[in-house]
Image: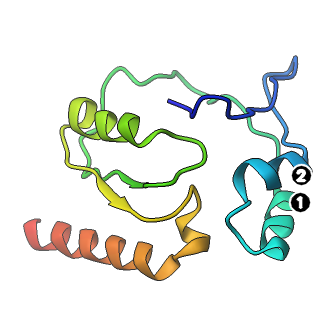
Amino acid sequence: MFREGFPIPPTRPDGTSVWDPAAAIIAMYSRLPPDTGRALAHRLRPMAPPSGAYPLSGHPDVSTALVYTSDDELFEPPWERFMARQLLGIEPIEIAGGHFPMIEDPATLADIFDGLARQHSESA
């Protein structure tokens, strides 16, 4: 679940929602260098609901991993662990940092993905 008090933008009549850049910087990008946070906030586009049937009737038969961050600004770590273990039947992978590990620590995230890909190719 979302962290209590997380300021999700309101949904507009067309079903989309849009972040105000200043609010996005405070809510999501405060861990990043200010120039990086500003640049990312100004690149945000409207969020839209899924185009097809959602939720899916079942989990697709594909290899799955759930990587979450210990200090995620959006999601609660206990919820991430629940999703992985109870709903997906996998052990989650926790890394340090906030919601954007691809910006904060891309090398660690790349190492995790590389290891997962190697495991998958070895078991195939």
Q: Quadrant of the C terminus?
A: bottom left
In 3D space, how far apart are the residues under numbered discs 1 and 2 (Cα atoms)? 6 Å
Residue at left offset 73%, top offset 60%: 30
At label 2, counting other C-alpha atoms closer than 10 Å, the crowd grade (few under 14, some 14-19, many 20 or more) is some
Q: Earlier in the sequence, mark 1 or mark 2?
A: 2
Q: Position of residue 108 (x, y in %)?
A: 41, 77
Rendering quarter of residue 37: bottom right
Residue at left offset 51%, top offset 77%: 106
Rendering quarter of residue 89: top left
Front residue (pair 93, 60): 93
Amino acid type indicated by mark 1: His
Q: Position of residue 36 (x, y in %)?
A: 78, 73
Q: Secondary structure at mark 1?
A: helix
Seen in the picture, residue 118 relative to 66 is either above or below; the reply is below
* Residue matched to label 2: 21
Front residue (pair 57, 104): 104
Residues tagged 1 and 2 counted as in contact (Cβ below 8 A) = yes
Residue at left offset 67%, top offset 65%: 31
Q: Position of residue 119 (x, y in %)?
A: 16, 70
Q: Position of residue 62 (x, y in %)?
A: 26, 47
Q: Secondary structure at mark 2?
A: helix
Front residue (pair 118, 89): 89
The tag on residue 42 is 1
Q: Nearer the viewer, mark 1 or mark 2?
A: 2
